[in-house]
Image (cartoon, coloured by chain):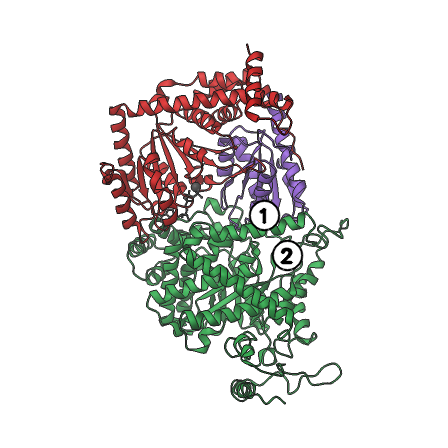
Chain colours: A purple, B red, C green
Amino acid sequence: MEKINRPYRVLVGKPGLDGHDRGAKFIARALRDEGFEVIYTGIRRTPDEIAAAAIQEDVAAIGLSSLSGAHLKLFPEVVKALERRGVTDIPVIGGGVIPEDDIPTLIAAGLTEIFTPGTPADTIINAFAEACRKHFAAQGDNH
Amino acid sequence: MLLPRPAENILLLKVTTISTIIERLKDNDPRAMARAISLVENNDPASREILASLDRESIKSSLVLGITGPPGAGKSTLTSQLISLLRQQNQRVGIIAIDPSSPISGGAILGDRVRMMDHALDPDVVVRSMATRGRLGGLCASAGAAVRIMASCGCRYILIETVGVGQSEMDIVSLADITLMVLAPGFGDDIQAMKAGLLEVADMIAVNKSDLPGAEGLCLDMEQLFHQRNMDGRQHVVKVAASLGQDIDKLLEAIRSLADQHDLKGEKDRRRQIALKRETLDWALETMRPELAVIIQKLQSDQGCDPRVNAETAITEFIKKNT
Amino acid sequence: MKTDTPFTDWQENELAKSISRFPERREKFTTHGGAEVQRLAVPEEIDNKYLTELGFPGKYPYTRGVQPTMYRGRLWTMRQYAGFSTAAESNKRYRYLLDQGTTGLSVAFDLPTQIGYDSDDAISSGEVGKVGVAIDTMADMETLFSEIPLDKISTSMTINSPAIVLLAMYVAVAEKQGVSADKLRGTIQNDVLKEYIARGTYIFPPRPSLRLITNIFQWCSSNTPSFNTISISGYHIREAGSTAAQEVAFTLANGMTYVQTALDAGLELDVFARRLAFFFNAHNNLLEEVAKFRAARRMWAKIMQDHFGATNPASKMLRFHTQTAGASLTAQQVNNNIVRVTIQALAAVLGGTQSLHTNSRDEALSLPTEESVRIALRTQQIIAHESGVADTIDPFAGSYYIEELTNRIEAEAEDLIAKIEDKGGVVACIEDGFIQRQIENAAYEYQKDIESKDRIIVGVNEFMIEEDQKPELLRVKPEVEEAQVANLRRVKQERNNELVAKRLSELRQCAGTDQNLMEPILAAVRSYASLGEICKELRSVFGEYRD
Ligand SMILES: Nc1nc2c(ncn2[C@@H]2O[C@H](COP(=O)(O)OP(=O)(O)OP(=O)(O)O)[C@@H](O)[C@H]2O)c(=O)[nH]1
Ligand SMILES: [Mg+2]
């Protein structure tokens, strides 16, 4: 495998209160194994805290996981929290127990992509890589 | 699955962006700080300009505290408590948390931040996680630059957390004005293994988890260690319970008083000089590395040849190209 | 007819005694062909090896079950619990269930309640009423059990870190109904160790949490003698991705920690040990799961006898509730989940569970619909009444494969427990992340196998189809949160706030000493201090755990 000498930095976070971090930790590890640097912020964090951490860590993308059914509220709030801090170029990806019906709502709220249980890890990792590329492309364009 | 190299566009940031970053750094803008650190970490040419723009006085007067110790001793918990205390005293704090990169994939999981998330919304607590990125010493260069950026942006105190195993972590210690070793009861084997070199790296020892049996004994043990070197053990060993927030103030007091002594003795300056030289060497090697790699790649080499001779050939070519 | 003495001895004693007290469900159990079903098949030769490794049901080491007649006497309890968003809605459902003849209620709480936050706390936003009922003050608890006589029912509460507060509210509501504490029956999960390990609804650091648990053990042993004070749970450990052997090892290690903590607090082993209950997961690998349950039972009996010196048989019996593996359900082709649940439920029954919750097919997507819940219950009923597995005891015993697997799981689990003890016990292993890492690694390997198709999950990485038919789903309305917050505001306005402040400060003072906290917490909940306020005081003294 070709090593990337300048790894992408991403953040994996769990907004809300559910403690089921099996999925989040798996993705964090799978990303690590594909050469990403993953800042993991642990369970039970507010959208605001996640956004602030993402900015301080200068990540290129954020992944969120929620299994308690609170995604419709919590995911968009991360996007809003970023916007409040003037940040619109960090793509946010969501995953977890999310009914099909909610996906358009979340996309409309600014999420880049939503993954439901059973999605192959490769698909998710590719989405992160794509999001990172978009992030850097946006930086190039904006300035 | 192969990942392409990240787009080169970090490098393509236009000059205006660099000047914007420099401008915003003066306002301690969190995104500018984060971006600046990334540029240095990625060895971006633009970082030179940024580093040149930093405020030297703030860098000089900052206190850099290295926090090291075996996994699970409570470094992150203690760091978080020190942050709380420093924040009560209205100090701006910078934290650099270092975790190892995977030697296989080059990726890393940076998890120390979990314990510092309680400060996430405090704009005066600047946390940056860094991976060792498998570089021999290059980490010193990036971490050193991150320290300066944070200091220049008003962080009087900068804490560097790193696991006390492995060479690159030990190198990091050289960046610190004061190195604090965190130990805890129940880590007998780890401590025994480190004992010989303990005082080489540690200016102070925090015996954490004082709520657990064995803390008292460990404390005496460590004080003894300082005694043997004719140093006042009680001044250098402090017992704390990080998860309970106990005696953090005593620890900070002890750190400060040691820092003051160092200041008076010129020890701080001496250490910074050494660190600077080390970082300079790091930068020199890091700067040459990409081009050297290309040269070596092209070098004819069969299995039987002597790599040392090859290296000399490569260096000669490197010098030729660059003169 | 067997003539070995140990067998006849068992028949004449344990079995006869049991049957005379609780007759079997039927005079005679028969096959489809009319032949009589053997109660308990045993080997031709009953040797020492058989007796030490398997023995007879209802007899040490309980490998074959904890009761002499098992399901021939009484079927396992089919306990389906569900969470409803508000206290009023839950109350309606409970009263309906009671009208239908149910005698046991089961309460699931929402996440803010489980973590000791009020519904109006910023961090609760989006989570109120989502996975269970929201309880802020005793007023909600009054609504929850309105017109339900608490001396007539048993209540099971899935609550851990703040269990002492919810228990206090329950006791206080009973008091208000005129029911004294000693009449109360039920179970609190109260297993905080697995929260650090796997489930994540921790509040305080492990040591103060264990103190709260001891306080509960102590208070309950003299005040609510019929309350099960803990349900030691491997379920969530498995859900987090552990292996079967890890599930057994970590659960039993946690159990040992609670026992030791209680002993250290001066409680008497044979008094509280019989009040310990367990809770396991039933996963897809039928044979491995059956072996797992049998191994766990044998191990606990040995641990209690040899390690703790228990003498009372009841102290050595591992009695457990089982839930089918939620994490094994797939969002793809949801009806396939009915089949998975059937296999898992069968494993639990063949493994000798005392009670069982079968998951609904759509739980991988959201709260189950009524129809799905019914199918899940029907699955248990079909196993109970049609499959025939309930008519004979421990039918897999003596299978070379099952016995070998049982031994292997036991050996692996014993190994892990020894490692934990070596490293200073469960709490030390939680603090340094040893246990979490073991589980994380197992989960990672498992998922990797799925990714590489070394492990086939039907409908997920093989046998996929295009699905366009969306299943009907149940959702919690967002208004629930607003209503609950308004409710809490009202209570806070109407109560005597001076009294609340006084009770809270008294509580804080006690928390700093080593006094039992149950009484000060009872006093606080009676003043309508909220769960969040009480936990805030405790947080200020105990600190907070962070993983
Ligand atoms: N009993 C007790 N536990 C503590 C104390 N301080 C920290 N801990 C616990 O020790 C464990 C490890 O703490 P961390 O702060 O993550 O340790 P660390 O040294 O940063 O660990 P790594 O980053 O993994 O190297 C956690 O479970 C803490 O809650 C203390 O004073 N007393
Ligand atoms: Mg740490």
Question: Is C95 displayed left or right of B81 in the figure?
Answer: right
Q: State the mark number for residue C328.
A: 2
Residue C184 in view in this figure: no
Callout 2 secondary element: helix
Image height check: is A140 above or below B110? above
Say few, some or many: other residues with alpha carbon within 10 Å of mark 1 (under 14 / 14 to 19 / 20 or more).
Answer: many
Say few, some or many: other residues with alpha carbon within 10 Å of mark 2 (under 14 / 14 to 19 / 20 or more).
Answer: some
Task: Give the amino acid at mark 2.
Answer: Ser
For the residues bearing labels 1 and 2, Cβ distance under 8 angstroms: no
Image height check: is C109 above or below B133? below
Q: For the residue with label 2, is its CB less than 8 Å from the closest atom of ligand 1? A: no
The residue marked by circle 2 belongs to what chain? Answer: C
As drawn, the residue found furthest toward the front would be: B304
Residue C343 image point, x, y percent = 67, 65
In 3D space, how far apart are the residues under numbered discs 1 and 2 (Cα atoms)?
A: 13 Å
The residue marked by circle 1 belongs to what chain? Answer: A
The residue at which mark 1 appears reads as: A23
Residue C321 image point, x, y percent = 54, 67
**Closer to the camera, C220 or B176?**
B176
Question: Dividing the image into 4 quarters, which one contains the C terminus of chain A?
Answer: top right
